[in-house]
């Protein structure tokens, strides 16, 4: 029996570009506030001490690594991919079934992350270079965030479900409110209650639980349902087929980043700092493309549910076109304003020059990133997550790590050669992803 969901306007009808704009703008705005949220934590940690800043930086990297190993990060993608077809058909009962199992799986994932973290957190902190006086501060942050990891996984799942329903505004609102709440809770827990680094972690956990509560409340009110964590073997298997590849892809990104930073570290810590700041600035410029990525996945997913494959193909074409115009605007900004942007973070000439060099070289691959994002979004909406995972392993980990090791360690090439390797691999990966995605869409249509 089909029931109409009380959701946003159906993505299976109407102008696709209009849907993209309606979904992408809130999604991008939410990502901006999420980035600012993370910068706020860094700022308060730095206000505590340089040691606290170093500890939080290491601990946050380890936390998301553990969350990806526990498959928690991929739950947003999995929830969206499985819920969107039922939402496109207007089947509230089907959507509720997936929501119940997404919430159950989210709780299970957080438990897995905690168990892994209990044994692996400290060795990973040491592996990332935490000195004896930094390690306790990093572990303070980690124990609190791991204990509250269920708030992260539940909020990821709820955000993915809302995206599948064509709602990116609710998550944007949650991220905006969370950003401002962080300004109040961080100083309260950190300084008033004198909890130090643990206070910064506690503020994040409280906000994530509040975010999960709010997003699930929106879902239940919109669909007029209740959500009960459930274990359904068949549904969990289908969810895992989507979630595991997405989380593994994220894991390869994290591991690839570790290797890249380690190789750049051969040239000095100032170059690591320059690359890290440059990478963060590039990610800010890519946020609109990531917002568009969320829109493409939601639109394609709902149209897959009603077998409107021509609209899936049109979504891909128009997503690439809009992404091209985004690149036309962002590339000159990235190239010409990189010196100004780097100067906002440091006066050290070595750090600035490394960041500027990375940003200017990586402009060559900017549109390639857009093509990759859109291709992966379409394939995930088609519930074909394995190819993006294999491509991610090659692009993020195996190929660049192998080439850069030979260039830097064996042949003694300069650091800048690593940046050209990154660009070349991204461009080739985008070309492969484009032709593969187009082939899969044509198979659907035929």
Image (tube, rainbow, N blue to C red):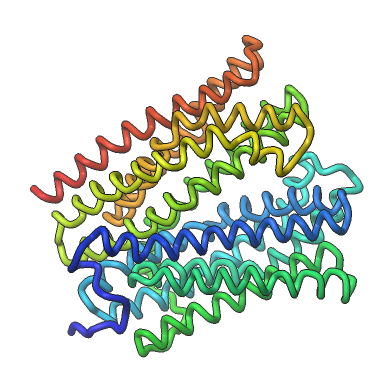
In the image, residue 419 sits, relative to residue 124, either above or below, namely above
In depth, the one of 128 and 107 nearer the eye is 128
Question: Which residue is rendered at x = 31% and y = 32% of the image?
Answer: 432
On the question of residue 234 being in view, the answer is no
Give coordinates of residue 15: x percent, y percent.
20, 63
Q: Position of residue 411 (x, y in %)?
A: 62, 9
* Residue 4 visible to an observer of this rendering: yes
Extreme residue toward the left, this view: 446
Image position of 389 (left or right of 35) = left
| Residue at x 84%, y 69% (from the top left corner) | 190
Report the quarter where the N terminus lies. Answer: bottom left
In the rendering, at what x and y percent does residue 76 appear?
45, 63
Q: Note whether 370 is above or below 52 in the view shown.
A: above
Considering every residue shown, the one lying at the far top of the view is: 411
Image side of residue 332 versus residue 262, left or right? left
Q: How many badges with numbers are in the image? A: 0
Q: Is residue 84 above or below residue 429?
A: below
Relative to the observer, which residue lies in front, 1 or 319?
319
| Quadrant of the image occupied by residue 112 | bottom right
x and y percent of residue 438 in the render?
A: 22, 41
At 50% from the left and 30% from the top, the residue drawn is 398
Please say if 282 is above or below 117. Answer: above
| Figure quadrant of residue 107 | bottom right
């Amino acid at each position: 029996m089909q029931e109409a969901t009380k959701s946003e306007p159906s993505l299976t009808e109407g102008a696709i570009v209009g849907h993209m704009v309606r979904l992408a703008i809130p999604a991008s705005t939410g990502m901006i506030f999420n980035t600012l949220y993370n910068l706020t934590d860094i700022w308060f940690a730095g206000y505590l001490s340089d040691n606290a800043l170093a500890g939080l930086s290491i601990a946050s990297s380890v936390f998301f690594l553990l969350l990806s190993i526990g498959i928690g990060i991929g739950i947003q993608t999995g929830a969206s991919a499985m819920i969107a077809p039922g939402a496109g058909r207007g089947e509230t009962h089907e959507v509720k079934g997936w929501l119940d199992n997404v919430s159950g799986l989210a709780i299970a994932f957080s438990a897995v992350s905690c168990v892994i973290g209990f044994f692996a957190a400290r060795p990973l902190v040491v592996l990332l270079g935490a000195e004896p006086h930094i390690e306790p501060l990093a572990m303070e942050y980690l124990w609190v965030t791991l204990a509250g990891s269920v708030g992260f996984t539940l909020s990821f799942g709820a955000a993915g479900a809302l995206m599948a329903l064509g709602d990116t505004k609710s998550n944007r609102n949650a991220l905006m409110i969370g950003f401002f709440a962080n300004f109040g809770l961080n100083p309260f827990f950190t300084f008033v209650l004198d909890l130090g680094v643990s206070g910064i972690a506690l503020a994040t956990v409280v906000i994530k639980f509040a975010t999960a509560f709010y997003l699930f409340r929106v879902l239940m009110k919109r669909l007029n349902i209740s959500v009960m964590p459930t274990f359904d073997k068949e549904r969990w298997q289908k969810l895992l087929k989507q979630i595991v590849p997405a989380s593994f892809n994220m894991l390869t990104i994290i591991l690839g980043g570790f290797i890249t930073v380690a190789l750049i570290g051969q040239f000095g810590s100032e170059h690591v700092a320059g690359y890290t700041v440059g990478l963060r600035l590039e990610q800010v410029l890519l946020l609109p493309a990531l917002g568009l990525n969320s829109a493409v996945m939601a639109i394609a997913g709902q149209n897959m549910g009603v077998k409107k494959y021509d609209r899936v193909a049109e979504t891909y074409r128009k997503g690439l076109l809009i992404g091209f115009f985004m690149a036309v605007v962002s590339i000159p900004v990235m190239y010409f304003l990189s010196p100004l942007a780097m100067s906002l973070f440091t006066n050290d000439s070595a750090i600035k020059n490394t960041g500027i060099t990375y940003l200017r070289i990586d402009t060559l691959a900017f549109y390639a990133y857009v093509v990759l994002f859109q291709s992966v979004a379409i394939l995930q909406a088609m519930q074909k997550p394995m190819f993006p995972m294999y491509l991610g392993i090659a692009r993020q980990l195996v190929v660049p790590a192998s080439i850069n090791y030979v260039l830097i360690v064996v042949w003694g090439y300069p650091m800048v050669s690593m940046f050209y390797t990154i660009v070349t691999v991204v461009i080739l990966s985008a070309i492969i992803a484009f032709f593969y995605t187009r082939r899969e869409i044509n198979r659907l249509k035929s």
